Image (spheres, rainbow, N blue to C red):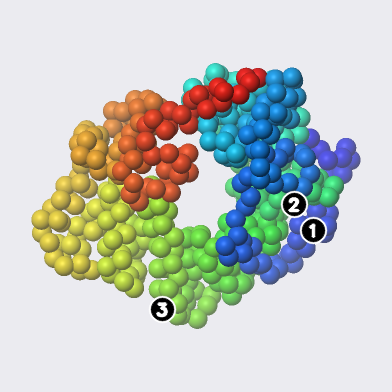
Amino acid sequence: MKATNSTPWWSIVAACLTLGCGQPPSATVPGAIPPPVLPEAGSSPPDAGIVARDAGPAVVVEKDVRQVLLEATRECEGGKAQACAQVATAYNEGRGVAVSRGCYARFVERACDLGDLEACSAVASVIRYESGLIPGDLTRAVALHQRACEGGVLDACDSLARAYESGSGVAKDPIRAAQLFERVCEGACAAALAGGLPSARACLPYAERLASGVGVPKDDARATEIFASACEQGAFDACLQVAQRLADGRGVAKDPQRAAELFETTCANAFGLGCHEGAERLREGRGVPKDAQKAADLEDRGIAWAASGCRMHGDVASCNQVAFAYARKGVVPQDPGVAAARLDVACSMGVADACRFLAQKVRQGQWVARDDARASELEARARDLRDPTRARVMLERGCEAWVSTDCYLLGDAYLTGKPAWNVKKDPERGRDLVLRACANGDSLDVECRMAGGFSHGEEQKALRGTAACDDVPNP
């Protein structure tokens, strides 16, 4: 979907940059990186009332929210797609009603049937990621994303690109994927030209393909320009890309000092890899003066970000990062007790290397008091996690004993299927196990809230069901 019939997309991007997406960077040094915009202390977004997506400035309705919902439901029943989407949003976000994925699915599918293409994209995502809420398979999801993309819904084009990239519901086609990512980029810039808000991240997937040469001819210089523009707009993962390129001279002239500044910027904004790479260069004096203390500070901050993702969200990749970080040569924890606690959490989340490394420290009396019995327990858990025939049994026993992290790991295995553990995909069992973990109320609290805000099975049934919307007129 070209913004014009004659203008090449890259000139449109350049125009976007000039009109508000950030000035084009120089050939050697990207522009200044703005600080992230944070909400004022004590402020919170309004959550009362229901506002249609295209109704202009939001107006908070503090009273009679239920009446607004009933009126919108009746309009939906009468065939108004916007009203159906409005009600779906209310159930999805809990605006004046209890959150209900089941009710959301009912109304968003009705909105799609009535011609709302954004709703069709949402339906496709529900089919793809939430088994059983809306009938259909991956083929139907692809068809809906295709329809919405052709109608100008950029999120649908992005989802369709990822389907072509992974072969999910459609034959793999990296060239088609790259074309769709390009469409998302140029569509976002065309919207900015028309007076909309520019999206710092819209062009990043296409830039990544330009950098790798997957599905499109490799072009490091163009990729660097896109990353630099996104960085200037506050996309800090793009800043990390720019820092790496400045450090290595890929697509831009080398500038180790500017690279070091950007590594620190990304580190300060929760990108642990930026912390690690910046620390490595400071430790070794690569392009910058050696500074062991500053390197240690950056490394510890990066591990702290990973530990937070591991503890609060149960993110296995973050848990792995904690284990790998402490095993790196030259990494000395600033607080050994905190380091041991972080490794303990990573071990409980199923990272065998974290169990093994912590066992060494416990047996040697480093970081924590020596405890041979505890070390043996950690070593046994590491062995079990590495043995596919024993891991599932170990987690089942732990879950039966109400060890929340074991329930969570086992549930996650059932949600996705894990042949190595002889676990077949079973979404219902997986959800039940994850909810059992949530019901215990431990370090997974944030992950549970993200999954829907409920901690018990009966509440989760209400979340997925439609009982909450049965007392209003059905569409």
Q: CA distance from mark 3 to mark 2?
A: 40 Å
Q: Amino acid at mark 2?
A: Pro
- Tell me residue 410's x, y (percent): 31, 36
Q: CA distance from mark 1 to mark 3?
A: 40 Å
Judging by the rendered image, the residue that carries numbered circle 1 is 20
- 179 sits to left or right of 402: right
Q: Of label 3 and label 2, which has the lower sequence position?
A: 2
Pick the quarter of the image with the C terminus. top right
Label 2: element kind: loop
Label 1: element kind: helix
Label 3: element kind: helix
Q: CA distance from mark 2 to mark 1?
A: 7 Å
Q: Of label 2 and label 1, which has the lower sequence position?
A: 1
Q: Residue most toward the right? A: 6
Quarter of the image where one finds residue 454: top left
Judging by the rendered image, the residue that carries numbered circle 3 is 292
- 179 sits to left or right of 433: right
Q: Of label 1 and label 3, which has the lower sequence position?
A: 1
Task: Give the class, few, some or many, for how many residues have Cα within 10 Å of label 1's Cα (few <14, many ≥20).
Answer: some
- Residues 364 and 87: in front is 87
Residue contact at pointers 2 and 1, CB within 8 angstroms? yes
The residue located at (51%, 60%) in the rendering is 270
- 157 sits to left or right of 97: right
Q: Amino acid at mark 1?
A: Gly
Judging by the rendered image, the residue that carries numbered circle 2 is 198
